[in-house]
């Protein structure tokens, strides 16, 4: 007969194996659900600067300005 610590170890090991199996099954089903990623750039070696320069110049700068937020007013009581 196995002791309680041995049974606990076996249950934990089984639990880990079941989790791994579940994750593998989910990953496989998700991989089948989504089409493979496609590189839409003309060159796979496009650098970041080129990508930024290719972005359209839309919107006003004020739309992207940082909003100053000091948070809520805090009242301290003595």
Image: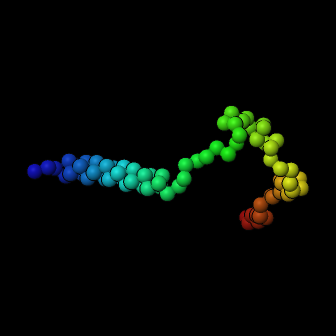
Give the x, y percent position of residue 8: 24, 51
Quadrant where the C terminus is found in the figure: bottom right
Displayed quadrant of residue 60: bottom right
Camera-nearest residue between 52 and 37: 37
Q: Relative to 41, is 57 on the left or the right?
A: right
Displayed quadrant of residue 53: top right
The residue located at (79%, 64%) in the rendering is: 73
The residue located at (55%, 49%) in the rendering is: 36
Give the x, y percent position of residue 54: 80, 44
Tell me: residue 23, above or below residue 41: below
Q: Residue furthest front?
A: 42
Q: Relative to 48, is 38 on the left or the right?
A: left
Picture colour scheme: rainbow
Residue 65 visible in the displayed image: no
The residue located at (66%, 36%) in the rendering is: 44
Displayed quadrant of residue 63: bottom right
The residue located at (49%, 57%) in the rendering is: 33
Camera-nearest residue between 13 and 59: 59
Counting every numbered tag in the picture gives: 0
Camera-nearest residue between 78 and 47: 47
Camera-nearest residue between 37 and 65: 37
Q: Residue furthest left?
A: 1
Residue 3 visible in the displayed image: yes
Q: Relative to 62, is 24 on the left or the right?
A: left
């Amino acid at each position: 007969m196995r002791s309680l610590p041995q049974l606990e170890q076996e249950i934990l090991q089984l639990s880990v194996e079941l989790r791994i199996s579940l994750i593998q099954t989910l990953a496989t089903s998700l991989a089948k659900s989504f089409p493979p990623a496609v590189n839409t750039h003309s060159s796979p070696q496009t650098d970041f600067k080129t990508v930024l320069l290719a972005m359209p110049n839309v919107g006003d700068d004020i739309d992207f300005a940082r909003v100053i937020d000091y948070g809520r007013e805090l009242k301290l009581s003595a």
